[in-house]
Image: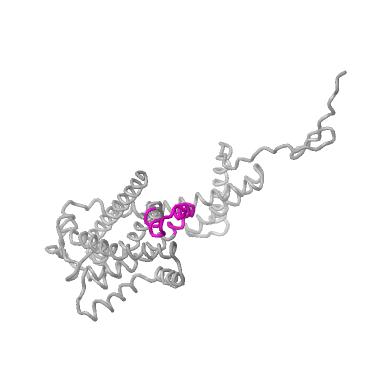
Amino acid sequence: MSVTSPPVEEHPGTTTVLGGVPSTVDEPRRRLERFSSDDLFELLGSAISALALMWVIFDRLVAFEGVFGFVVCVYLMFLCIYAVVSGQHHGRLAASDRVMTVVMWSAGALVVGLLVMVIGYVIVRGLPGLRPNFFTETLATTGSLDPATAGGGLHSIVGTFQQVGIALLISLPVAMVTAVYLNEVGGRFAKPVRFVIDAMSGIPSIVAGLFIYAIWIVPSGRGYSGFAAALALSIIMLPTICRTALEMLRLVPDGLREAALALGAPRWSVTWKIVLPTARSGLVTAVILGVARAVGETAPVLLTSFGSSVMNGNPFAGPQDNLPLFVWKQIGSFKDAQQERAWIGAFVLIVLVLTAFTAARWLGNKNRKTR
């Protein structure tokens, strides 16, 4: 005698009734990251619709003017249209995810686009006039009527490397020790030290230059020098390196510290042999950000090293030039040749900074792979 199962009633969405006993049926997963050709048409259609609608409003109805306002209104209208279209086809949750994805991608594209525009403009203005003599000559024998290809910036390149190098030697140990103290040691002085570091992050660069000018150059009578500029740059570097290094040390798992301490290792050994090597790549990033913060500063260098058109290889005596100061002096001239020379200096500065950053990043990744 066969037994017939009772009919199964399926209710869409949540349950299946089997013999009067409800049982849960898994709903299909919503894959928000899936992007098909239909989604692409929705995106392009929304963009074209927003562009056409705002063109009609701007050009035919209210006669507004201004490219920036038009672009902003088109973008906002595009988000509204895209949200409505996505909501009708995919539901409210998927529509919210897609709109926020578009916003995030737009923000990233805007940042990258602005960076490419700045670097591209400097390359277009500076690269055509660059000659090998820029790296071998100074402005000692160059006059205001000479072409842009005459003379060079060797004295500024040397001054840049010396000043930034000395500033890094001063600020790096202090910043690293401070970051280790705040994250690994702590104590009652941790909060005041953290407050000072945060306050130094907001100090304008010209204030750092005035500080060194007031306590180093004027009272002692030593005069302008590359070392005075390095002191001002170290004040600018220190909070950036310290705060970034502190965040990198916080990312080291506490389990590594606890395991080493459980094996009987002293705390200083744990910090030196476990914590710092683990955060090495992040600490290299901290150094890169510190150098980037200081290498393009002009105001503190103008107040402390004053600048020079001749070579001065001694940073402890006499005025000394660097590339940002070189660019500032040349671009302030009314001569086209000197302004073109300023763009050459700006291009060389970008190349040197990118080269140093790439080398530092490569060394950091290499050390991390060899551990």
- Outermost residue toward the bottom in this view: 219
Q: Quadrant of the C terminus?
A: top left
* Residue 234 in magenta stretch: no
Scheme of image coloration: one colour
- Residue 365 horizontal/vertical position (percent): 36, 47
Identify the residue at image location x=25%, y=71%: 228
Left/right of residue 367 with respect to residue 187 in the rendered view: left
The part of the chain drawn in magenta is: 247-273
Say above or below: 74 vs 217: above
- Outermost residue toward the left in this view: 141
Between 65 and 114, the residue placed more toward the observer is 114
- Outermost residue toward the front in this view: 264
Identify the residue at image location x=41%, y=59%: 267
Say above or below: 48 vs 292: above
* Residue 250 in magenta stretch: yes
- Residue 254 horizontal/vertical position (percent): 48, 55
Identify the residue at image location x=24%, y=81%: 219
Identify the residue at image location x=42%, y=61%: 246
Left/right of residue 193 with respect to residue 350 in the rendered view: right
Identify the image quadrant of residue 175.
bottom left
Tell me which secondary structure the magenta stretch mostly adopts. helix
Between 94 and 80, the residue placed more toward the observer is 94
- Outermost residue toward the right in this view: 1
Count of marks, rendered view: 0
- Residue 90 horizontal/vertical position (percent): 65, 42
Q: Quadrant of the N terminus?
A: top right
- Residue 331 horizontal/vertical position (percent): 26, 64
Between 125 and 87, the residue placed more toward the observer is 87
